[in-house]
């Protein structure tokens, strides 16, 4: 992606990606300006990706879907426990569980990898696949 350099206003080359480390979502954005000698920068973070960076990831890297395969002995209650996270209401968690089971949970590659990691503890196998 090419954006404007904050120093000189020229074309800046930028890249972004996300992934999962120890069950946590991590994101990174790097940039450089060919017109400014030594102009290289990086921003990174954990867990919640800023909306503008998430949008960039979806645009550049694509939209991913989580495909699930239940193992014997899995339970919806176990899935709800695995999906529980700070700040989410019971209704939001139930809606996410419904999307996961229907194969309709989508997001960035890293978000879907993190979701796959979480649902393994609930007796479901999850794989990510790019849908667009």
Image (cartoon, helix red, strand yellow):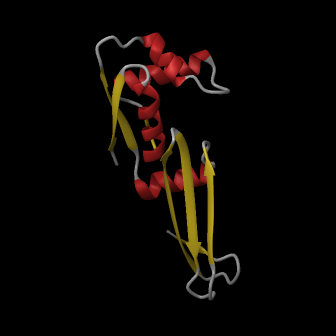
Q: Residue at x 58, y 16 (%)?
A: 91
Would residue 109 be found to the left or right of residue 87 on screen?
A: left
Task: Looking at this view, name the residue that lies furthest to the right.
Answer: 7
In the image, residue 16 lies at what x, y percent?
A: 51, 60
Q: Give the quadrant of residue 3.
A: bottom right
Would residue 20 be found to the left or right of residue 12 on screen?
A: left
Compared with 126, 36 (above or below) is below
Looking at the picture, tell me which residue is in the foreground, 41 or 58. 41
In the image, residue 25 lies at what x, y percent?
A: 54, 44
Compared with 9, 65 (above or below) is above
In the image, residue 2 lies at what x, y percent?
A: 52, 72
Q: Residue at x 58, y 54 (%)?
A: 53
Q: Give the quadrant of residue 113.
A: top left
Q: Residue at x 60, y 42 (%)?
A: 47
In the image, residue 84 lies at what x, y percent?
A: 57, 22
Q: Residue at x 47, y 51 (%)?
A: 58
Q: Is residue 108 visible?
A: no
Task: Looking at this view, name the residue that lies furthest to the front.
Answer: 22
Q: Is residue 27 visible?
A: yes
Compared with 71, 53 (above or below) is below
Q: Give the quadrant of residue 68.
A: top left
């Amino acid at each position: 992606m090419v954006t404007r350099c904050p120093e000189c206003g020229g074309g800046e080359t930028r890249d972004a990606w996300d992934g999962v480390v120890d069950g946590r979502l991590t994101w990174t954005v790097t940039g450089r300006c060919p017109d400014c000698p030594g102009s290289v920068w990086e921003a990174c973070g954990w867990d919640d990706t800023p909306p503008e960076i998430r949008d960039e990831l979806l645009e550049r890297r694509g939209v991913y879907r989580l495909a699930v395969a239940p193992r014997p002995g899995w339970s919806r209650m176990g899935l709800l426990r695995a999906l529980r996270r700070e700040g989410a209401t019971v209704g939001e968690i139930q809606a996410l569980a419904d999307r996961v089971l229907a194969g309709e949970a989508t997001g960035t590659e890293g978000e879907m990898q993190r979701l796959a990691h979480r649902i393994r503890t609930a007796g479901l196998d999850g794989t990510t696949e790019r849908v667009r």
